[in-house]
Image: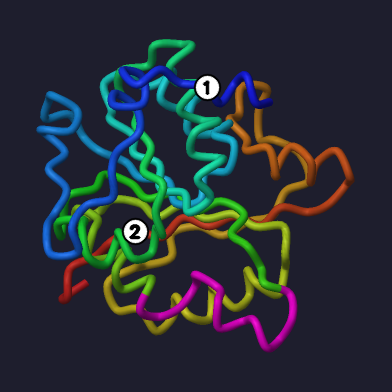
């Protein structure tokens, strides 16, 4: 594992972004060197979804936000070994970056898979899912673009659906549960793969950004 995290200074500069200033927006055109659509994954862990999706969609730019620096560098090393040009990682609090540094209406999709459930009741306030978070999600997305979420914790999913009802600019398109990938070529995270192998149910949803009049 340690070997996979070793990056040269040049590789680190290419795939790992420095935390932006709190009062500045990320310039995706400058960061990626093109004006292709941008998607963000918050909390990408070891990067299974992020890396595979970036490979499969070379004309889309992907930015991963992950507060655990060790996972950010593990994923960056995977990007470097494969020389994936359309994906970068930023070791930072994803919710804060979304609030402070993502230009409104600049994303084509936002992905949140298997967020930390913070099991103890006194820790629930640490959960990323909240009305303010979903409002920031809606603000960051282009009109009609999706927010994709998955978890293997049913109460967390139920809470998300309830919070979503109070978010005026996100409209639930689909919610479903599954105990296996939907197809042979489905892209799953490490957490999702583990959940399926242990026979657990995975809960997923897609919500679409809407206009105030929708």
Q: Is residue 182 left or right of residue 66?
A: right
Neighbour tally class for label 1: few under 14, some 14-19, many 20 plus, Cα within 10 Å: some
| Sequence-first tag of 1 and 2 | 1
Image quadrant where residue 38 sits: top left
Q: CA distance from mark 1 to mark 2?
A: 39 Å
Neighbour tally class for label 2: few under 14, some 14-19, many 20 plus, Cα within 10 Å: many
x and y, in percent, of residue 114 in the image: 62, 54
x and y, in percent, of residue 49 in the image: 54, 34
- The residue under label 1 is 6
x and y, in percent, of residue 110 in the image: 37, 50
Magenta stretch, residue numbers: 119-132
- For label 1, the SS is loop
Image quadrant where residue 61 sits: top left
Q: Is residue 61 above or below residue 70?
A: above
Between 166 and 118, the one lying in front of the other is 118
Please tell me which residue is depicted at 79% across the width and 41% down the height of the picture. 194
Between 103 and 77, the one lying in front of the other is 77
- The residue under label 2 is 208
Please tell me which residue is depicted at 51% across the width and 24% down the height of the picture. 52
Looking at the image, is mark 1 or mark 2 nearer the viewer?
1
Residue sitting at the far bottom: 122
Q: Can you say which quadrant of the picture contains the C terminus?
A: bottom left
Colour approach in the figure: rainbow
Q: Is residue 98 left or right of residue 163?
A: left
Q: Is residue 166 above or below residue 179?
A: below
Between 112 and 13, the one lying in front of the other is 13
């Amino acid at each position: 594992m340690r070997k996979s995290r070793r990056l040269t200074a040049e590789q680190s500069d290419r795939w790992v972004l420095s935390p932006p200033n709190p009062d500045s927006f990320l310039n995706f055109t400058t960061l990626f060197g093109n004006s292709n659509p941008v998607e963000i994954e918050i909390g990408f862990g070891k990067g299974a979804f992020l890396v595979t999706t970036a490979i499969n969609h070379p004309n889309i730019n992907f930015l991963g936000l992950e507060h655990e620096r060790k996972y950010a560098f593990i994923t960056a090393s995977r990007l470097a070994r494969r020389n994936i040009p359309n994906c970068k990682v930023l070791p930072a609090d994803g919710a804060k970056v979304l609030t402070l540094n993502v230009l409104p209406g600049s994303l084509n999709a936002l992905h949140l898979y298997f967020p930390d459930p913070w099991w103890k009741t006194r820790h629930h306030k640490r959960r990323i899912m909240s009305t303010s978070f979903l409002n920031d999600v809606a603000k960051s997305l282009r009109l009609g673009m999706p927010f994709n979420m998955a978890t293997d914790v049913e109460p967390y999913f139920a809470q998300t659906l309830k919070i979503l009802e109070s978010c005026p600019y996100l409209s639930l398109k689909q919610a479903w549960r599954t105990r296996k990938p939907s197809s042979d070529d489905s892209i799953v995270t490490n957490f999702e793969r583990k959940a399926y192998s242990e026979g657990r149910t995975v809960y997923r949803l897609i919500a679409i950004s809407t206009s105030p009049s929708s």
